[in-house]
Image (spheres, rainbow, N blue to C red):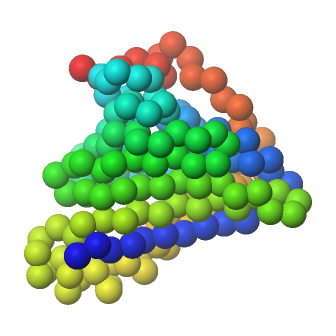
Amino acid sequence: MKAVVNASVELPGIEPSAAFAAMVDLAAQQRWMIATRLYPLEADAPVPRVGSRVAAFTGVGGLGFLDTMTVTAYEPPHRWVVDKDGQLLRGIGTMQVTPVAGGCRASWTNELTLPFGILGRLAFPVIRPVAELALRACLQRMARMLRTGELPGDHQPSGDERKVLR
């Protein structure tokens, strides 16, 4: 069964290119994604380009889950798509920026194959609103950081941030 979890936020006064840069840069993502550490994995292309690989650990104090993914579409400044191929999360993740009057809208959608068989299908109606609340909270955090200048939208990764896990 495919399950969809999504959220979006309006970003008045923010250029689409700035929002997109904040969404695809791993160092920036770590600042606005709640309780998540991101790591580039060895691949044929650098993050955020097509073919690059990323690992994201979400959790606190070592308790959480690892989400691994391969970038399958990179269309600046509008769309970034990953194929989630981890042990727990499998499916497609899409981050999208849409221009609107006076700014843009940032959206984050995960189309997932639910784990744990029937238990996953039974639990999803309870988990979905919590997951969507978490995605929305992350996007709102990104929006606040872009508005206050805490998160420059044109961030260029430093040497340390470009390190690749092997």
Q: Does residue 121 lie above or below 35 as drawn?
A: below
166 horizontally vs 15: left or right: left
Q: Is residue 15 left or right of residue 35?
A: right
Above or below, 68 against 111 in this view is: above
Q: Is residue 148 visible?
A: no
Residue 106 lies, in percent from the top left, at 64, 58
- Residue at image x 86%, y 54%? 13
Instruction: Return the residue nearer the eye: 89 or 159.
Output: 89
The quarter holding residue 127 reads bottom left
Count of marks placed on residues: 0
Q: Position of residue 146 (x, y in %)?
A: 73, 47
Q: Nearer the viewer, residue 55 or 104?
A: 104
Q: Tell me the residue at 40%/39% (across/down).
A: 71
Q: Is residue 99 above or below residue 81?
A: below
Quadrant into which the C terminus falls = top left
* Vertical comparison of 15 with 90: above or below: above
- Residue drawn where x is 39% and y is 72% of the image: 4
Residue 104 appearing in the image: yes
Q: Residue at x 59, y 55 (%)?
A: 96
Q: Quadrant of the N terminus?
A: bottom left
Q: Residue 49 placed where, x, y %?
A: 48, 31
Q: Nearer the viewer, residue 55 or 84?
A: 84
Name the image quarter holding residue 7: bottom right
Residue at the extreme top: 159
Q: Quadrant of residue 5?
A: bottom left
Q: Give whichever of 160, 112 is nearer the camera.
A: 112
Give the image location of residue 18, x and y in percent. Answer: 73, 41
